[in-house]
Amino acid sequence: MEDQELKEIYENAMKDIEKIDSLDSLNEVKNDYLSKKSRFMGLMAKMKELTIEGKKAFGEAINRAKNDITTKIEEKRILLEQKQLEKKLKEEEIDFTLPAVNYEIGGKNPFFIIQDEMIDIFLGMGYEIAEGPEVELDHFNFELLNIPKDHPARDMQDTFYIDENTLMRTHTSPVQARVMQEKKGKPIKIICPGKVYRRDDDDATHSHQFGQIEGLVVDKNITLSNLKATLELFIKKMYGEKREIRLRSSYFPFTEPSVEVDVSCDCGGKENCSKCKGTGWIEILGGGMVHPNVLKMSGYDPNEYQGFAFGVGIERVAMLRYGIDDIRRFYQNDVRFLSQFKRK
Ligand code: DAH
């Protein structure tokens, strides 16, 4: 670099950049040396006095100097940004060694453990979940299920009435009628988990509120063997491969034929077994083939379509699975009970 002035500017720039310790002053220096009004501008006057070759060489020297300065500034910028970040991280450091506040983590109520498991089993068989209101019309809870006013079957399902035609649903079965009306003659494969209500005196096996899961399949060529296979699969998934089911004939106004389904007891029929009372079988749910009247009332032609349905009490399934002796335990929020179901 022959020109003394250029040399000075260059060396000053390098020194200035070296000294800088903040991004703000770096920008100032950048302005000083590289902007349109930079110190190099003064050199331009000299250009005029030079030969063509001289101009070329001088121009190149200026550009080289500027490039060097630019590189130096950018290197410095990276360095300063790095320092700034380190400073920030240091300031915001969290002390992980502080002891945590000790608190108890709750567990899922066994009602919901079992409800979720049941739902999973049926979702795995391709069922969809349907919902219906807990405050239900008499029309859906009874009439459309083939239980007209004054039918004796109403006696077993007394409930809480809102007014003459509105009540707390006594079972999840009204959702059958609701779904049929919604699907308007198309095939159906749903379960409906939910709360139901009865005017019952609470004891070890009865509660004024409990949970049920309803199942409904409507399609062409549906038979009782489809129901049996479905429930057998459900029971084996729920209680283990060794369990068997037994169908006994029964009566529900909304199914014909109707069945009561028993599951084999794991005691193998011991005389003093508290679960099966020595019979080897435990009643678990009700079901049957959807009554032609029920299909007809909600818009399905029983000559074309058949269906099966079932209803199962969630607490009952949970009580058998865990050996719970009293249905009221599900609702009392007693940690001595609940903590036994905590996930480890
Ligand atoms: N709804 C009946 C009850 O609560 C249970 C039931 C029985 C449901 C037979 C059904 C069925 O869908 O087909 O006692």
Image (cartoon, helix red, strand yellow):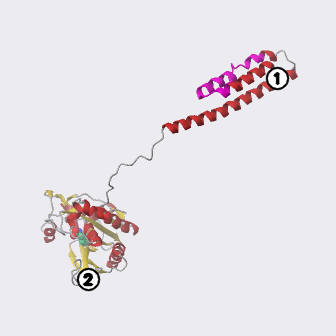
The residue segment tinted magenta is: 16-44
Q: x and y percent of residue 49 in the render? A: 84, 15
Q: x and y percent of residue 278 in the render? A: 22, 83
**What residue is rendered at 25% in x and 78% in y?**
282
**What residue is rendered at 70% in x and 31% in y?**
72
Label 2 sits on residue: 280
Query: The disc labelled 2 sits on which kind of residue?
Result: Gly
**What residue is rendered at 74% in x and 24% in y?**
11
Q: x and y percent of residue 316 in the render? A: 25, 70
User: Is label 1 in a helix, a strand or a loop?
Assistant: helix
Report the disc number at residue 82: none
User: Is label 2 in a helix, a strand or a loop?
Assistant: loop
Dots 1 and 2: beta carbons under 8 Å?
no
Residue 231 lies in quadrant? bottom left
Q: Earlier in the sequence, mark 1 or mark 2?
A: 1
Check the picture and name the quadrant holding the N terminus: top right
Label 1 sits on residue: 58
Instruction: Tell me: residue 61, above or below residue 209.
Output: above
Residue 158 lies in quadrant? bottom left
Residue 214 lies in quadrant? bottom left
Q: Residues within 10 Å of mark 2 (few under 14, many from 20)?
A: some
Residue 260 appears in the rendering: no
